[in-house]
Image (tube, helix red, strand yellow):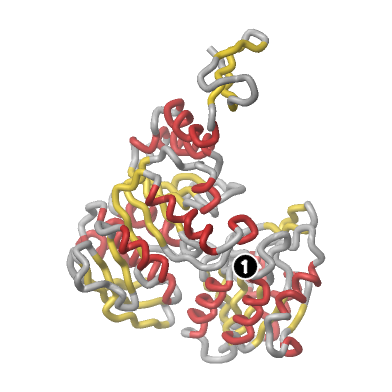
């Protein structure tokens, strides 16, 4: 029998049932807050039937969820991901519009994954999703915090409210294990409030008097193929060869490792399978060809992410470091000059271009970026993104590195209200004569 659930407004009271054209209408107050639980019951509580790990933070969510899913699958799970890249079993991910879908969509997707045999799911949890109660009734076996830096202030207003939104994952949601990045200032504050959390650090921010569990890097050696990581932890010590580029990806990998250890996966098995972990599409993804510059495609679209991506690329750069980037239209304007300043400071050549201008004038966005530079005259400005990427790759020398930042895995450019086909990955691959 069909029924309609509606928000109790006006004369309708909570729990009241009326009939409309022969169909019962159930009125509920605060429906938005209750929708996740209602959908969960309708779909037979899918988060009870697999290991669900939630990952929140400004940067690193996609890489961390992908690493969790890959690693757990190498240990025998049937793993899935939900997030920015899409939802689905590994190898069968379907692109989605939002990082975290609606409350009903999330429960529906999880139920579908359970029906397909998934036993493990790593889910990106956005600040919007938390504030809007989209994951309110999910039962997380573990919740991971990566970091917090400026983003989405067009929605949250300020950093205080942005942090409060992220904290909801721990304060108002079922969370079996808490894994926190202790290198982040916000993470250290949260660790003080979560005595049973697992603290993870690359920078020796583990409190020796902490009674909780911990994992920290002892030594990291960066090389052309990635990094060699020696670590110590509450579960024992070990060494991992990683194919991922940059310090922030080492942090993401350690967070994934700590999460799986906290969930009971054996350290010995994790170490045996670590070398088989693959880099994530559009996340510090390296493209090379003989006689050509090295090109790195990354999703970095915040000031902090851009700085870290440039620092990571610098570790592998013998020549000049190029940076091709832009900022999204109709979004937080305050980050534009910050990103301009970062590109000027950390890159040798900054190429400023478009990145989803939406309904704003592209040149106005570029001018906002240039306003953050001390000497904007040295920046190369080119509104067409494909042309800007082509210019950088063609002009860069063999020992140079070109970081193409902002879009990562995305295969579109939003101009006005149109979503046009465009991919940094495909553009770069074509220029280098390789396969994306």
Q: Is residue 427 above or below residue 380?
A: above
Q: Is residue 178 visible?
A: yes
Query: Which residue does the numbered mark 1 point to in the structure image?
Result: 406
In the image, what residue occupies the spot 61% across and 59% down? 157
Viewed as shown, does residue 404 lie left or right of 330? left
Viewed as shown, does residue 419 lie left or right of 217? right
Residue 44 falls in which quadrant of the image?
Answer: top left
Q: Is residue 14 above or below residue 327?
A: above
Please name whichever residue, 305 or 171, is drawn nearer the observer in this view of the structure.
171
Q: Is residue 247 above or below residue 214?
A: below
Residue 379 falls in which quadrant of the image?
Answer: bottom right
In the image, what residue occupies the spot 48% across and 65% down? 148
Viewed as shown, does residue 172 lie left or right of 34? left
In the image, what residue occupies the spot 51% across and 51% down? 83
Viewed as shown, does residue 430 lie left or right of 149? right
Q: Percent from the top left, x then y, of residue 249?
A: 42, 70
Q: Is residue 78 visible?
A: no
Q: Percent from the top left, x then y, of residue 235?
A: 18, 63
Q: Percent from the top left, x then y, of residue 34?
A: 48, 32
Image quadrant in which the C terminus is located:
bottom right
Q: Secondary structure at mark 1?
A: loop
Q: Percent from the top left, x then y, of residue 417?
A: 78, 52
- Tally the numbered discs: 1
Please rate how many residues cluster around mark 1, counting C-alpha atoms within 10 Å: few if below 14, some from 14 to 19, many from 20.
many
In the image, what residue occupies the spot 53% across and 25% down? 28
Please name whichever residue, 239 or 147, is drawn nearer the observer in this view of the structure.
147
Residue occupying the far front of the picture: 11
Residue occupying the far top of the picture: 22
């Amino acid at each position: 029998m069909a029924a309609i659930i509606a928000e109790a407004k006006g004369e309708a009271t909570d729990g009241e049932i009326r009939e409309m054209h022969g169909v019962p209408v159930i009125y509920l107050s605060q429906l938005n807050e209750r929708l996740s639980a209602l959908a969960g019951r309708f779909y037979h509580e899918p988060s009870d039937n697999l290991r669900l790990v939630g990952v929140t933070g400004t940067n690193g969510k996609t890489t961390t969820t992908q690493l969790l899913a890959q690693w757990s699958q190498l240990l025998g799970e049937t793993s899935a991901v939900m997030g920015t890249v899409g939802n689905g079993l590994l190898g069968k991910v379907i692109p989605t519009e939002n990082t975290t879908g609606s409350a009903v969509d999330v429960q529906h997707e999880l139920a579908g994954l359970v029906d397909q045999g998934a036993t493990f799911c790593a889910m990106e949890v956005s600040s919007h999703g938390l504030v809007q109660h989209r994951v309110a009734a999910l039962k997380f076996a573990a919740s991971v915090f990566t970091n917090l830096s400026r983003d989405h202030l067009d929605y949250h207003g300020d950093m205080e409210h942005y942090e409060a939104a992220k904290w909801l994952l721990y304060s108002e949601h079922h969370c079996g294990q808490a894994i926190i990045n202790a290198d982040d200032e916000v993470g250290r504050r949260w660790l003080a409030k979560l005595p049973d959390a697992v603290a993870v650090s690359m920078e020796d921010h583990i409190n020796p008097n902490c009674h909780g569990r911990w994992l920290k890097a002892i030594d990291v050696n960066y090389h052309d193929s990635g990094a060699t990581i020696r670590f110590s932890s509450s579960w024992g010590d070990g060494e991992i060869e990683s194919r991922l580029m940059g310090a922030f990806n080492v942090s993401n990998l350690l967070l994934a490792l700590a999460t799986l250890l906290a969930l009971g996966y054996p350290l010995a098995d994790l170490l045996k399978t670590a070398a088989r972990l693959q880099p994530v599409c559009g996340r510090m993804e390296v493209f090379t060809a003989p006689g050509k510059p090295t090109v790195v495609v990354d999703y970095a679209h915040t000031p902090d992410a851009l700085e870290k991506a440039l620092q990571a690329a610098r570790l592998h750069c013998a020549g000049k470091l190029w940076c091709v980037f832009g900022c999204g239209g109709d979004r937080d304007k305050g980050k534009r000059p910050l990103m301009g300043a970062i590109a000027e400071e950390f890159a040798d050549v900054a190429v400023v271009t478009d990145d989803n201008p939406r309904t704003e004038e592209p040149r106005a966005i570029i001018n906002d970026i240039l306003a953050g530079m001390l000497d904007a005259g040295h920046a190369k400005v080119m509104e067409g993104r494909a042309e800007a990427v082509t210019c950088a790759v063609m002009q860069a020398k063999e020992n140079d590195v070109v970081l193409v930042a902002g879009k990562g895995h995305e295969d579109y450019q939003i101009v006005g209200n149109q979503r046009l086909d465009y991919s940094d990955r495909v553009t770069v691959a074509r220029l280098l004569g390789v396969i994306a």
